[in-house]
Amino acid sequence: MITVHHLNRSRSHRILWLLEEIGQDYDVVPYQRDAKTNLAPPALKQVHPLGKSPMIELDGKLIVESAAIAEILCARFAPQMIPAPDSDAYVQHLELMHFAEGSVMTPILLQLYTSRLGEAGAPLQPRIRSELDNHFSYMNGLVRASGHFVQDTLSAADIMLSFPAEIAMRDPEGATRYPELARFVGMIKDRPAYQRATEKGAMNG
Ligand SMILES: N[C@@H](CCC(=O)N[C@@H](CS)C(=O)NCC(=O)O)C(=O)O
């Protein structure tokens, strides 16, 4: 049995999408961001001290961190979504699983927070923008002819990179600057499982 602790408008969408892709039944426990602060409600801290989403319960065991959740779910239910450990693709896959939270989220979150500082944050903006471009350009260069990262069928890295790729597309110039990323985002949004996850997220959001 799988339960997803799902926060609206969050990285938790990746896990709903993954579960839809691998055809596993799951329950959703919904949480709403505070309308003023945009933060998660205190109820999430009663589930885990970090109070972040996603978290899942898998056979009664609580698991946090999207990349860990994705790895565990794929290893158990969809091994084809992780390249074979002795392949070059595996190395790139592992790098991108870490890159998705450990690298590209840093300039994304810096931009989010400093944008609230108005003029006080202005001196930081050129460096943040340059780092965003650095990371998004890198991702743009990795999209394969098939529209995926790493391998020509959907992988756990595609799921993890969907969140930063969609953020890149929020910039009005995103699709022009990063056309390969735009193709990736188009490809994932066309997937019925992605669309079902979006509907489930909205129903619980
Ligand atoms: N590295 C974590 C990040 C989790 C995270 O920060 N989630 C955000 C939603 S995108 C959250 O719960 N924010 C609410 C808050 O900080 O109050 C993961 O990938 O699961």
Image (tube, helix red, strand yellow):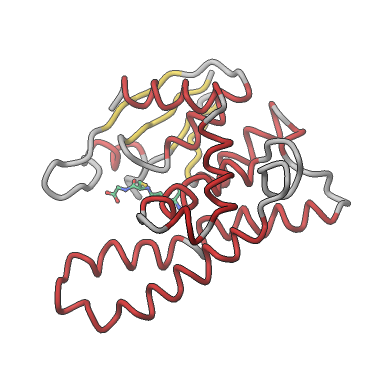
The residue located at (28%, 28%) in the rendering is: 205
Q: Which of 76 and 172 is in front in this view?
A: 172
Q: Work out whether residue 129 or residue 57 is closer to the camera in this orientation and state it.
A: 129
Question: Measuring 49% from the left and 19% from the top, which residue is drawn there?
Answer: 26
* Residue 60 position (above or below residue 55): above
When asked about the image quadrant of residue 95, the answer is bottom right
Outermost residue, left side: 36
The single residue placed furthest to the right in the displayed view is: 86
Q: In this view, does 33 lie above or below 37?
A: above
Q: Is residue 2 above or below residue 169?
A: above
- Residue positioned most to the bottom: 123
State the residue in front, 198 or 58: 198
Q: Residue at x 59, y 18 (%)?
A: 24
Seen as rendered, the residue at the extreme top is 25
Location of residue 89 in the rendering, given as x and y in whole percent from the top left corner:
80, 52
Position of residue 47 measured from the top left corner of the image (x, y, whole percent):
34, 36
Residue at x 49%, y 51% (from the top left corner): 165
Q: Quadrant of the N terminus?
A: top right
Residue 203 placed where, x, y %?
Answer: 31, 19
Q: Is residue 127 above or below residue 108?
A: below
Residue 185 horizontal side relative to residue 5, left or right: right
100 with respect to 131 (left or right): right
Residue 82 placement, left or right of 117? right
Q: Where is residue 67 in the image (x, y as percent from the top left)?
A: 56, 47
Is 30 left, or right, of 61 in this rendering? Answer: left
